[in-house]
């Protein structure tokens, strides 16, 4: 039996690949170019090109579970993901584990309608709803450079707190959801072990780096301008991101952390900063 990992070159997908292969499972990764990191096997696959949907099943007829990371930067992924789910079911796939987000309810944008669809068709599934990734501080065009060049972390989140989660902990939850005998058939939040405000994050990073990092409190307009220029996001996606941060300011992620339906990761933000200090050196 084989586990197909879509988004296999991405942050959670690649960690998941390492976890599953270390545990002796057969896996197949996808990427738009068809190239995946050594030593994994990969196939060309593009959510926006349905002619690539049969590639995984032509490469391996034993695929029975799929990790779904939908097309990035798409507001509603269901029109792209549904035809693949339908095909996969006919090819013998028995379980789908979908990466969504804490802010996205069933039926909502991005992966929210995929969540709703899987429940509707009655196939085994799990929906992972992680909070903000710790890795947002180390990868991407905006925050890492802002730390390196200006010693600032910008946000509109004010004093709102978030239990930042590591991609290692998300991959572990994905692995558990794929392998557990009785499928979850529901969603679960994935959070880190502690709630921190952006002021506290900046103080933590200052201690680790030995230089002063500050939390710059941005207005929504300032943030929109940064994310659409430096960040390269569309106005719609930048506004969605700002809305998420505004909700953080209003306590949304504290409510997620206090929700009983969650998996709590092990990695503390301090450990994450301490294991990567060179990332923020100019
Ligand atoms: N960042 C956060 O804090 C956060 C929090 C909660 C949830 N999330 C969710 O996490 C998901 C992944 O985000 P990420 O930034 O971590 O991305 P990522 O997984 O690091 O990268 C995206 C992956 O998807 C693949 N991909 C992109 N477009 C594709 C397409 N059209 N067809 C097939 N594959 C495609 C890429 O592979 P190739 O380039 O090799 O094709 C890559 O492996 C998003 O849906 C987001 O909603 C993020």
Image (cartoon, rainbow, N blue to C red):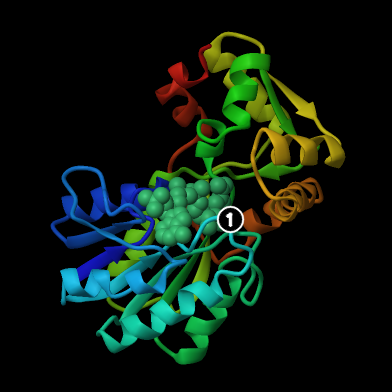
Q: Which residue is mark 1?
A: 73
Please give the name of the residue rendered at 50% of the width and 73% of the height, measured from the top-left corner.
Answer: 80
- SS at badge 1: loop
Q: Quadrant of residue 168?
A: top left
The quadrant the N terminus occupies is: bottom left
* Vertical arrangement, residue 95 with respect to residue 270, above or below: below
Q: Position of residue 210 (x, y in %)?
A: 56, 9
Q: Position of residue 147 (x, y in %)?
A: 62, 21
* Vertical arrangement, residue 77 with respect to residue 44, above or below: below
Q: Is residue 187 left or right of residue 171?
A: right
Please give the name of the residue rendered at 56% of the width and 32% of the height, measured from the top-left corner.
Answer: 137
View extreme (left): residue: 24
Q: Is residue 259 left or right of residue 114?
A: right
Crowd around label 1: few <14 · some 14–19 · many ≥20 (10 Å) = few
Q: Which residue is more in the foreground, 119 or 229?
A: 229
Q: Is residue 18 left or right of residue 80?
A: left
Q: Is residue 62 left or right of residue 236?
A: left
* Vertical arrangement, residue 147 with respect to residue 227, above or below: above
Q: Which residue is more in the foreground, 4 or 225?
A: 225
Q: Which residue is more in the foreground, 233 or 136?
A: 233
Q: Position of residue 17 (x, y in %)?
A: 27, 52
Please give the name of the residue rendered at 65% of the width and 23% of the height, measured from the top-left corner.
Answer: 146
Q: Which residue is more in the foreground, 207 or 148?
A: 148
Residue at mark 1: C-beta within 8 A of ligand 1 = yes
Residue 130 seen anywhere in this rendered image of the structure: no
Please give the name of the residue rendered at 19% of the width and 50% of the height, measured from the top-left corner.
Answer: 40
Residue 208 seen anywhere in this rendered image of the structure: yes
């Amino acid at each position: 039996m084989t586990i197909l990992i879509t988004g296999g070159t991405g942050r959670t997908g690649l960690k998941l690949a390492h976890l599953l292969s270390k545990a002796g499972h057969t896996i197949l990764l996808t990427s738009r170019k068809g190239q995946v990191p050594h030593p994994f096997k990969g196939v060309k696959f593009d959510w926006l090109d349905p002619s690539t949907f049969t590639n995984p099943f032509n490469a391996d007829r034993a695929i029975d579970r799929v990790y779904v990371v939908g097309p990035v930067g798409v507001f509603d992924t269901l029109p792209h993901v549904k035809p693949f789910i339908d095909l996969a079911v006919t090819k013998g796939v028995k379980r789908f584990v979908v990466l969504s987000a804490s802010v996205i309810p069933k039926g909502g944008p991005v992966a929210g309608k995929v969540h709703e669809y899987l429940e509707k068709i009655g196939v085994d599934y799990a929906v992972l709803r992680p909070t903000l990734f710790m890795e947002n501080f180390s990868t991407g065009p905006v925050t890492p450079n802002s730390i390196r060049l200006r010693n600032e972390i910008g946000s509109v989140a004010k004093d709102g707190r978030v239990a930042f989660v590591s991609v290692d902990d998300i991959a572990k939850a994905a692995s558990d959801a794929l392998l557990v005998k009785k499928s979850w058939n529901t969603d679960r939040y994935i959070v880190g072990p502690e709630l921190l405000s952006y002021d506290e994050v900046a103080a933590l990073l200052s201690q680790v780096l030995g230089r002063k990092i500050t939390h710059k409190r941005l207005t929504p307009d300032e943030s929109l301008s940064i994310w659409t220029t430096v960040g390269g996001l569309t106005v719609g996606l930048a506004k969605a991101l700002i809305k998420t941060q505004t909700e953080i300011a209003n306590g949304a992620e504290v409510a997620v952390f206090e929700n009983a339906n969650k998996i709590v990761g092990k990695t503390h933000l301090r450990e994450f900063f301490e294991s990567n200090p060179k990332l923020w050196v100019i």
